[in-house]
Amino acid sequence: MKKYLIFISIILLTFLSVNAASNTNYITILTFGEYGNREGEFDYPVGIFIDKNSNLFITDWENDRIQKFNSEGRLLKVIPSKDSELKIDGPAGIVLDQNENIIVVEQFNNRVHKISPEGKSLNLVGKEGSGPGEFLNPRGIAIDKDDNIYVVDTGNSRIQIFSSDFKYIKQFGREGMGDGE
């Protein structure tokens, strides 16, 4: 009898937990931007990063730019600016390093680009291929506490890791359906 009571108690707790989670209501607290190519508008936003001041850096894939907004959705900056020599193509994943440099994956160029907070090109790595430092349709990016850069190399089914100055460290993963593939 004791086993049955414990079993029923576990089932009830599970049901109540699942039921409570499914009844959670979310409230939209802010919406900004709309479709277009003017400043503050988007044509296929892909990546987002929130800095230590709660500013949002959003990659605008089809418009080939990064837009920076404050936490209320007010546009602060567009990179590259209209008068800049900097060009980015198909920006996807985005992070900021400890010096607030922008590191963005350029999906169309098969490269990763480091850009200063002022919008100047600092460093690049990558070209189309499958060797170390080469990419095929890269998309995602992350950075660790030591500013090592992890790039999701989608077309090559792997993650490549680089130092903060874009020196190749290692890679892991491969195509397949097993663990680590």
Image: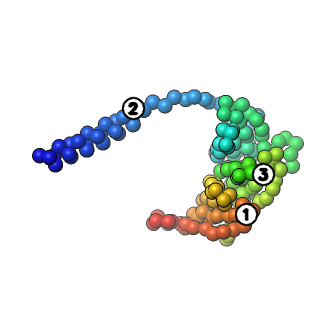
Can the viewer see residue 108? no
The residue lying at 84 percent from left, 41 percent from top is 82
SS at circle 2: loop
Query: Residue at label 1?
Result: 166
Q: CA distance from mark 2 to mark 1?
A: 46 Å
Q: Are marks 3 and 2 in contact (CB under 8 Å)?
A: no
Mark 1: few/some/many CA within 10 Å (<14, 14-19, 20+): some
Residue placed most toward the observer, 62 or 21:
21
Is residue 57 found left or right of 2 in the rendered image?
right
Query: Residue at label 2?
Result: 23
Mark 2: few/some/many CA within 10 Å (<14, 14-19, 20+): few
SS at circle 3: strand
Residue placed most toward the observer, 80 or 4:
4
Q: Position of residue 177 (x, y in %)?
A: 46, 64
Which one is earlier in the sequence, the residue at label 3 or at label 2?
2
Q: Position of residue 113 (x, y in %)?
A: 75, 55
Can the viewer see residue 27? yes
Mark 3: few/some/many CA within 10 Å (<14, 14-19, 20+): many
Type of residue at label 2?
Answer: Asn
The mark found on residue 115 in the picture is: 3
Is residue 67 found left or right of 26 in the rendered image?
right
Which one is earlier in the sequence, the residue at label 2 or at label 1?
2
Q: CA distance from mark 3 to mark 2?
A: 43 Å
Type of residue at label 1?
Answer: Phe
Q: CA distance from mark 3 to mark 1?
A: 13 Å
The answer to whether 125 is drawn above or below residue 86 in the figure is: below
The residue lying at 61 percent from left, 29 percent from top is 30
The residue lying at 70 percent from left, 52 percent from top is 97
Q: Position of residue 29 (x, y in %)?
A: 57, 28
Q: Position of residue 67 (x, y in %)?
A: 73, 40
